[in-house]
Amino acid sequence: GRPAGKFGKRVDRMIEHVQHSGAKRWHGPRRAMSAEDRAAFLDARIAGVKAGLQLSAEQEKLWGPVESTVRDLGKKWGDRFAARREEWQKRREAMKDNKEPPAIDHVDRLRKRADNLAERAADMKRFADAAQPLYATLDEGQKRRLQTLIGHRRSGMMHRWHNRDRDDGPRRG
């Protein structure tokens, strides 16, 4: 668990500082994104990738399943993240004023983590299946632009999709 008391508060301040270190003026901890915010950012990201790829008429026909899968998975992951955030907020509330947090069942946590990883693996396969027909038609310029458009999210599905054929050593992210 997280350390309580003075040290725990110091850790919280350090985390908040790191999260907001790029801002000129810090206005307190970040607020949770609403479902509408997540949907808006997903829409913008999808539109940006599509515009950057400059799809041909034939490729446009293959875009629909990719976009649909990205939207479904984005909503699913956003909902899962919101639920996890809520759980952590409950734990933090229980730890305020140096109260002892609820005990953690580590074996149960391992099982939940394994289930989540299996579910995420199935989601990634679903995305790969939807994306493969379109990706097979992209020219080298489109593949390069795709890498630039999604390159900053090194651990995301689209990064793995783009680099799935690389065989130049261990993969990061």
Image (tube, helix red, strand yellow):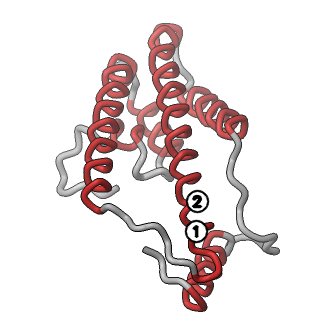
Would you say the residues marked 2 and 1 are in contact, meaning their CB atoms lie under 8 Å apart?
yes
Quickly name the residue at label 1: 94
Instruction: Give the position of the C terminus as an image quadrant.
Output: bottom left
Q: Is residue 25 left or right of residue 160?
A: right
Q: Residues within 10 Å of mark 1 (few under 14, many from 20)?
A: some
Q: Residue 166, relative to residue 7: is it above or below? A: above
Image quadrant in which you'd find residue 144 = top left
Q: x%, y% of residue 19?
A: 63, 69
Which residue appears farthest toward the bottom when viewing the image?
A: 6
Q: Residue 120, relative to residue 87: is it above or below? A: above
Please name whichever residue, 82 or 63, is drawn nearer the observer in this view of the structure. 82
Please name whichever residue, 52 or 22, is drawn nearer the observer in this view of the structure. 22
Please name whichever residue, 116 or 86, is drawn nearer the observer in this view of the structure. 86
Residue for point 42% across, 45% down: 156
What amino acid type should be assigned to the residue bearing mark 2? Lys
Instruction: Give the position of the N terminus as an image quadrant.
Output: bottom left
Residue for point 66% across, 33% down: 39
Residue for point 20% across, 57% down: 170
Image quadrant in which you'd find residue 79 = top right
For mark 2, give the secondary structure.
helix
Residue 23's tag is none
Residue 90's tag is 2
Q: x%, y% of residue 103?
A: 40, 67
What amino acid type should be assigned to the residue bearing mark 1? Ala
Q: Residues within 10 Å of mark 2 (few under 14, many from 20)?
A: few
Q: How many marks?
A: 2
Q: x%, y% of residue 13?
A: 65, 81
For mark 1, give the secondary structure.
helix
Q: Residue 103, relative to residue 71: is it above or below? A: below
| Disc 2 to disc 1, C-alpha distance | 6 Å
Residue for point 47% across, 76% down: 2
Q: x%, y% of residue 123?
A: 35, 31
